[in-house]
Image: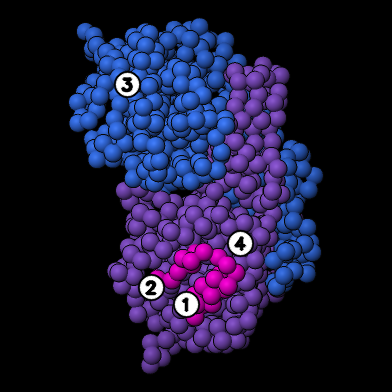
Chain colours: A blue, B purple
Amino acid sequence: MTTTPQDLEAVAARAAAAAEPCAATTPVARARALVAVADAIADSSDELVEIAAAETGLTEVRLRGERARTTVQLRLFADVVLDGGYLDARIDVADDDFVLGRRPDVRRYLAPVGPVVNFAASNFPFAFSVAGGDTASALAAGCPVIVKGHSGHPLLSRRTAEIVAEALAGAGMPDGMFQLVTGQQEGIAILKDPRVMAGSFTGSIAAGRLLADVAAARPEPIPFFGELGSVNPVFVTQGALDERADEIAAGFVASVSGSAGQLCTKPGFVFVPSGHGLEPAIAAAAASVASHRLLNPRIAAAYSARRSEIVHAPGVRVVAEGIVRIDDDGQGWVTPTIVVVGAETLVAERDRLLDECFGPLSILVEYAAGTDLAGLVPMLFQGNLTATVHRGAAEEPAVLRDLVRVLAEHAGRVLFDGWPTGVAVTPAMQHGGPWPATTNDSSTSVGTAAIARFLRPVAYQGAPQALLPEPLRDANPWGVPQSIAGAGESIRWGASVS
Amino acid sequence: MTTTPQDLEAVAARAAAAAEPCAATTPVARARALVAVADAIADSSDELVEIAAAETGLTEVRLRGERARTTVQLRLFADVVLDGGYLDARIDVADDDFVLGRRPDVRRYLAPVGPVVNFAASNFPFAFSVAGGDTASALAAGCPVIVKGHSGHPLLSRRTAEIVAEALAGAGMPDGMFQLVTGQQEGIAILKDPRVMAGSFTGSIAAGRLLADVAAARPEPIPFFGELGSVNPVFVTQGALDERADEIAAGFVASVSGSAGQLCTKPGFVFVPSGHGLEPAIAAAAASVASHRLLNPRIAAAYSARRSEIVHAPGVRVVAEGIVRIDDDGQGWVTPTIVVVGAETLVAERDRLLDECFGPLSILVEYAAGTDLAGLVPMLFQGNLTATVHRGAAEEPAVLRDLVRVLAEHAGRVLFDGWPTGVAVTPAMQHGGPWPATTNDSSTSVGTAAIARFLRPVAYQGAPQALLPEPLRDANPWGVPQSIAGAGESIRWGASVS
């Protein structure tokens, strides 16, 4: 069931009407509302997990974990709202002696952008869907949210939306603060609506690019935060291998096979020294992974085709064959496929091998001792969400400096001695990266910094206290951090050495 | 003289090669380099102002002030670099007891994006040109800068570029940190170059839109920060008029006629209560303004045509006719033109009257007592850089609450009892606003926050201290502010009420 054009007009009108009341909610009221949503989802956990399992094929353990993460996210954003640091409140005290002549009283903070449309993902039916991180951060920012539900879990989307809307209403939030629409064309139509001020998305490069282009081509372009594709390269040094080969083999297979490899941070390429000897351990670990359903028949068909392409590419050898069984409903059942290729072959066959394979397949890449890994990265990879280094504790860090620098240029998160799947939701987390990891590398879609996507700066000059937003008033009724530039301190170092 | 295709390839290659060395410069070295550029420009002030006056027609007083602002900006950014708060360094201490299971050590800061192309403006040959705010903030961020010089002041551009490049080299900055290109097609070609990672622009809506579309349509889209058009509405209350009619008339004419009205913050519409009686004072003030040359023949022709259109529109009455004289070189010489129209007429004729008129023309708009000004704003205005309210000191602020709220939704800066021209360069300044004021409302192009345009977040997870960027190390060798999330404090309020 999709939204009708008439509905879309009503949805956009309700969201627009909710913008001012949402922005006007106090931090305490908004935080309470986020907690109320978290509580309501937690209270319905059994019901929601059951629907999600049937619709997505994800395991109950995984879905319970994801449900918990989703409610924790909402609670974290309640803290963010109450803390108020995200408002970046700045106050320039008027200064008659400013170096360029009288400086007025100017105060600046970040205000909500207005209605946001959030395109839900298929692979995180809780954490990147109706009540996921994009919704939590936009609600926390004070924006009305329109979720375009994913067709892969329609019942879960509808039920979650009911719970969210009811919890917000119960917490006294404005009518129209949260709405759900469905349908691809409907999503595009809402993104084009002049009343919508920003978009967010998690999904494929093709769909993300299409939507980013729609947002950029509007008569009034709007920011669009898409999280698209990533192959998450991993580099294992000889020192790491010498120290903990078995642990690396086991960790690798677990990271590739978790959620049937349907994670944006799945390690797609793992560079290992030639003569690594990991194959038996990897094959054994892969053979012990239980068959897992893929999210939907479309993903099953795409995985099956992409897997065949990779397995049959020149120079590719199979370490763990894995299975892909398509059942009578078109659903795919899989176990991990691990292949190996030489680094030179990967370079030669990059057009065939480098595109993301969404599912439990990963490519070991063997490199000869002395290979310039830092030099290899720009030849192979565009932007990624993550890049990983496994090193030996006894190795001199300096030998990795060039590699780490190049990886930081190509990824939003560089991690050491771990696996990129399992993204912590914390203040310092960065889930983003250069194109095509995201459409907008200045932002994150995981962690508390994600709220910044839905804010815009507004300054007030010479305003009477009563007409200032609360975060900018001298009395600071919300108790937010205020960064104050006092009179007479306008230029410090820059003046003293001139 | 324009850059050849061969040059462009070399320019992009040099900028790309400079990215890593620029990013690696220490705060002290980078700050010293910014101060060295400021000093060098100050030392050449007489020479530069003379060239600028001949090329732009702007007065010496204005140009000396703008030159001073330009060097102050560079010094302010030296302070920003040294302070290090712009890096937004965040450290999540590893936490075994995190609510979702073990939280790793994650550290995040903002890194330079890489090569930036900055399209210079015609109307600020110093402050928004070769060594202007975009260049200062990008250099401060640690990015190589390519300036696309404006054709309106080619000699000044070239001479300033020499001074900047020499000062940077003298301060030990990397080769390729700063380069100048010229030519419209060359600018577009550089913006398309895959080695360029961000663009900035100040100019017309048409040119800004074209460039924004180029940036968005690249195979790898990049952020583009354009500051385009604004008509900067001003609202004068009866109380303000009763208190200081003469001051308002004089301030208005000064703000409209300064720099011959060729400022992006020129007040284009001034709403006054019917029966205001300001006309004689405005006419007298306008008559006393000396004739001023417009920037170039193209602007002269455009202003002349747009002025005619407005002066002859139905319902428009002339208060101060002003002059437009085109000399034998095609240069335009002008004095201010002020017209008046009723608010209802403005609404009826909005398609004809509302577009920006770049030059010393402004429209008084008479409104009847009791008019819903807050309701009028969305009927008339898109996004603006500024919106202004003149109120009486004795007036109850609450009566303006709706108007101020609506203005904050339509502008980046709302100011009181002043005029929008003359933008302070300070931490809290916001120079931006919803489309078409800018292509990207999340940023500012004036003030120290402008540095954020040229940064991208990168996180490090579980990294050895020696492989962390300096701002994220425990030892904090650069002494930057670090925001630390300790163990055991992951959720506070959001947990306590659940």
Which residue is under mark 3?
A338
| Kind of residue at disc 3 | Ile
Residue ID at (30%, 19%) = A319
Q: Report, in whole angstroms, how far the alpha carbon at label 1 lies from the one at label 3.
A: 57 Å
Residue ID at (59%, 27%) = B104
The residues colored magenta run B159-181
User: Which quadrant: the N terminus of chain B?
Assistant: bottom left
Which residue is under mark 4?
B30
Q: Earlier in the sequence, mark 4 or mark 1?
A: 4
Quadrant of residue A106 within the rendered picture: bottom right
| Kind of residue at disc 1 | Ser
Residue B165 is inside the magenta segment:
yes
Q: Are marks 4 and 1 in contact (CB under 8 Å)?
A: no
- Depth check: give the residue in front, B340 or B267: B267
Residue ID at (49%, 51%) = B113
* Callout 4 secondary element: helix
Give the chain letter at badge 1: B
Q: Report, in whole angstroms, how far the alpha carbon at label 4 lies from the one at label 1.
A: 23 Å
Q: Mark 4 against mark 2, which lies toward the viewer?
A: 4
In the figure, is residue B191 to the left or right of A71?
Answer: left
Residue A246, image x, y percentages: 46, 17
Which residue is under mark 1?
B157
Residue A73, image x, y percentages: 57, 25
Local crowd size for mark 4, using a 10 Å CA cut-off: few (<14), some (14–19), many (≥20): many
Q: Report, in whole angstroms, how far the alpha carbon at label 3 lies from the one at label 4.
A: 47 Å
Quadrant of residue B2 within the rendered picture: bottom left
Residue B370 is inside the magenta segment:
no
In the displayed structure, B205 sits above or below A393; it is below
Q: Mark 3 against mark 2, which lies toward the viewer?
A: 3
Which residue is under mark 2?
B182
User: Which quadrant: the C terminus of chain B?
Assistant: top right
